[in-house]
Amino acid sequence: MPILPAEPDRYPSALLDPASSDALGPSRAWWVLHTRPRQEKSLARPLCPAGIALYLPSVPRRCRVRGRVLTAHVPLFTSYLFLLADRDERLAALASDRVVQVLTVHDQERLWHDLRQTQRLLATGAAVSAEDRLAPGTPVEITTGPLAGLYGTVVRTASGRRFVVRVDFIQQGASVLLEDCALLPHRPAPVLSA
């Protein structure tokens, strides 16, 4: 089977821009679609031409086919597609019979934040990998370099220290191997009661 070229990972292209959360309308909400195995792209393809907003973060993966090295673009979070839709658009996505379960997002702002951080991590061009079932660690902020301003967790693995950006809703994350990033412990601002 031929390996397809990279497809857009989001629709519209400005979906994760901070101003877009208001521009897309108040009737739309995030939904996380848990797809059948290897059906994420097949689900996304007809949704874009239909004008349904979605995010399917993907990463390049190199493989050897008949002696040639090819690059495939695979979903970062296997079997998950993030859909920003109203009721009718969500039903249109479900009509494809590629969805196993629809997960309701109760904290919309938190998911916006997590997805924007994931996209920023991917935009650096660094080798990003998925992290299943995140281990507890120290929350940190990167203070310098192309990832400055990102909040996440540092996890030690056999390959070294990895910086993890979490998508708490699906209990997964994206990680990048740290090199020369300056890290500071992140302490959330105290909540003042009235």
Image (cartoon, grey):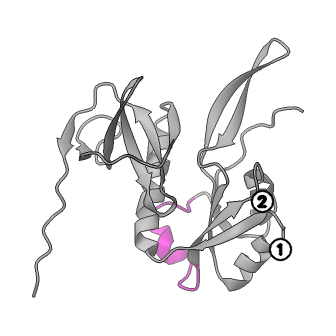
Crowd band around label 2 with a 10 angstrom C-alpha radius: few (<14), some (14–19), many (20+): many
Residue 144: quarter of image: top left
Asked which secondary structure carries label 2, the reply is helix
Residue under the image location 68 percent in, 49 percent down: 8
Residue 147: quarter of image: top left
- The answer to whether the residues at label 2 and label 1 have Cβ atoms under 8 Å apart is no
Residue 187: quarter of image: bottom left
Residue type at mark 2 is Leu
N-terminal-most mark, 2 or 1: 2
In this rendering, does residue 11 appear at all? no
Residue type at mark 1 is Ala
Residue 99 at x, y percent in the picture: 75, 65
Residue 188 at x, y percent in the picture: 19, 61
In the rendered image, residue 23 lying in the magenta stretch gets the answer yes
In the rendered image, residue 27 lying in the magenta stretch gets the answer yes
Q: Which stretch is magenta?
A: 14-28
Residue 83 at x, y percent in the picture: 63, 67
Q: CA distance from mark 2 to mark 1?
A: 10 Å
Kindly identify which residue carries mark 1: 95
The N terminus - image quarter = top right
Kindly identify which residue carries mark 2: 43
